[in-house]
Image (cartoon, grey):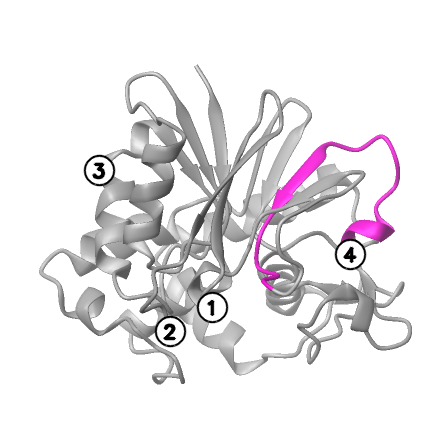
Amino acid sequence: MATFVIGDIHGCLREFRELLERVRFSTTRDRLWLVGDLVNGGPDSLGVLRWVRRHHRVVTCVLGNHDLYAVARFAGIIDKKKRDTLKRLLAASDAEELLEWLRRRPLIHQRGGHLMVHAGLAPQWSVPLAKGLARELESILESPQAFAFLRRYFRKPKLSWSGKLRGKERLCAALRVLTMIRTCRPSGALCHDFSGPPEEAPPKCIPWYQLRPEGEPTYYFGHWAALGYRALPNAFALDSGCVWGNHLTALRRRDGAVFKVDAAPDAP
């Protein structure tokens, strides 16, 4: 049995299927970890969600920011944004079933010394604190209060984490870290407007993984397409920008073997 960790798919079903063939993935023997952002940007978010939902017994995926956006779009919480490719998914007869399933995915998944999150952790968080915040958020997102909470969350797009926050603002800031962080200041304030490669980050905007202490789990994350695939001292970055015309990447966890497929020539 092998466990493969795959970067942001963003509705790129063709490349996802090709990558599974390349790694010789078996739905009866192997396991998949998906770092989130299953949908939006590519041409077939509906096909990706149907495949993942159908094989849920062998797939673990965490929520990404585009997944939350899709849930909020279906609920009528937010308006359509630029590069929205969700029309076919939102109009599908099984859209409600698929998106209800999607919003119930975890925000952090840990197995032994391996931890998967879509974007990253704040520098002030211990791993137990991060997991506790994730569990609080998951409880809300699984509840009837999910849409009221998401409405509040999307009203405050640049709320940064602070230990002084309380109540729903504290959880909104935690959700932004888990699904949106790339670089931040040592205080934990996110550098919201920077999404480029870390070598071009503004002064005092530090990649989140550089602020983590030694001796922690190995992190697997996506979200940062400009970072690309990187094997870091304490983490693996897996968003290699398939939706931007680059690659979709899989890592075989047991030996670190890396597999890539090129984006389709007609990728946006």
Q: Quadrant of the C terminus?
A: bottom left
Circle 3 residue: 54
Marked residue nearer the N-terminal end (3 or 2): 3
Could you say which disc has been placed on residue 208 in the image?
A: 4
Is residue 212 inside the magenta stretch?
Answer: yes
Q: Nearer the viewer, mark 1 or mark 4?
A: 1
Pointers 2 and 1 in contact (C-beta within 8 Å): yes
Estimate the spatial distance between the alpha carbons at disc 3 and disc 2, rounded to whole Å: 27 Å
Estimate the spatial distance between the alpha carbons at disc 4 and disc 2, rounded to whole Å: 29 Å
Circle 2 residue: 268
Few, some or many C-alpha atoms within 10 Å of disc 1 (few <14, some 14-19, many ≥20)? some
Pointers 4 and 2 in contact (C-beta within 8 Å): no
Residue at 18% across / 60% down in the picture? 95
**Which residue is more in the foreground, 258 or 159?**
258
Which residues are drawn in magenta? 209-225
Pointers 3 and 2 in contact (C-beta within 8 Å): no
Q: Nearer the viewer, mark 3 or mark 1?
A: 1
